Image (cartoon, rainbow, N blue to C red):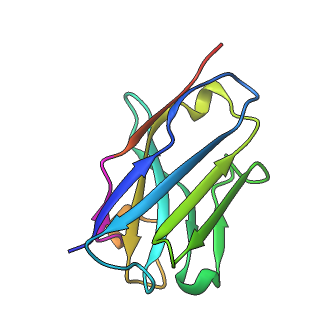
Amino acid sequence: QLRLVESGGGLVQPGGSLRLSCTAHGSHFTYYAIGWFRQAPGKGREFVALIKYKSVGLIYADSVQGRSTISRDDAKNTVYLRMSSVKPEDTAVYYCAASRNVDYLLKEWSYDYWGQGTQVTVSS
């Protein structure tokens, strides 16, 4: 019912910035929490950031705290993730996901819908 599409990935130099977008199709995600996860080669999927229903809560992983901003525009059915001072360790496929839950949102299993992912490569 809800299809999520990520965009904005690509190659960025260490210390640079990027903006990822997650747009929903087929339904509105007004009542969903939206999370960003990433998966580096050979590693499991890890939590990056999330934004709750009506933006009442924002949570960032320690690895991106202080250099990331997540925001949502429900009128555009889009969530954004901005990252600055990127590091090679940020290289991964980034996924957005939608959840109807209000708790356990740092966990993959809390999310019902996932996008296809967008590749972010941080390299000099």
In the image, residue 28 sits, relative to residue 98, either above or below, namely below
Q: Quadrant of the C terminus?
A: top right
User: Which residue of the protein is positioned furthest toward the top in this rendering?
Assistant: 124
Q: Residue at x 55, y 79 (%)?
A: 52
Q: Residue at x 60, y 30 (%)?
A: 89
Q: Residue at x 58, y 86 (%)?
A: 54
Give yes or no for residue 114 being in the magenta stretch: yes
Dominant SS in magenta = loop
User: Which residue of the protein is positioned furthest toward the right in this rendering?
Assistant: 66
Question: What is the x, y in percent for residue 100?
Answer: 37, 83
Q: Nearer the viewer, residue 2 or 59?
A: 2
In the image, residue 76 sits, relative to residue 38, either above or below, namely below
Residue 112 appears left or right of 19: left
Residue 102 appears left or right of 60: left
Question: What is the x, y in percent for residue 28?
Answer: 37, 79
Give yes or no for residue 69 being in the magenta stretch: no
User: Which residue of the protein is positioned furthest toward the left in this rendering?
Assistant: 1
Question: What is the x, y in percent for residue 104?
Answer: 46, 75
In the image, residue 75 sits, relative to residue 48, either above or below, namely below
Choose top left, top right, bottom left or bottom right for residue 110. Answer: bottom left
Q: Residue at x 76, y 36 (%)?
A: 85
Question: What is the x, y in percent for residue 94?
Answer: 45, 44
Q: Quadrant of the N terminus?
A: bottom left
Q: Nearer the viewer, residue 97 or 40?
A: 97
Choose top left, top right, bottom left or bottom right for residue 70. Answer: bottom right
Which residues fall within the magenta stretch?
111-116
In the image, residue 65 sits, relative to residue 58, either above or below, namely above
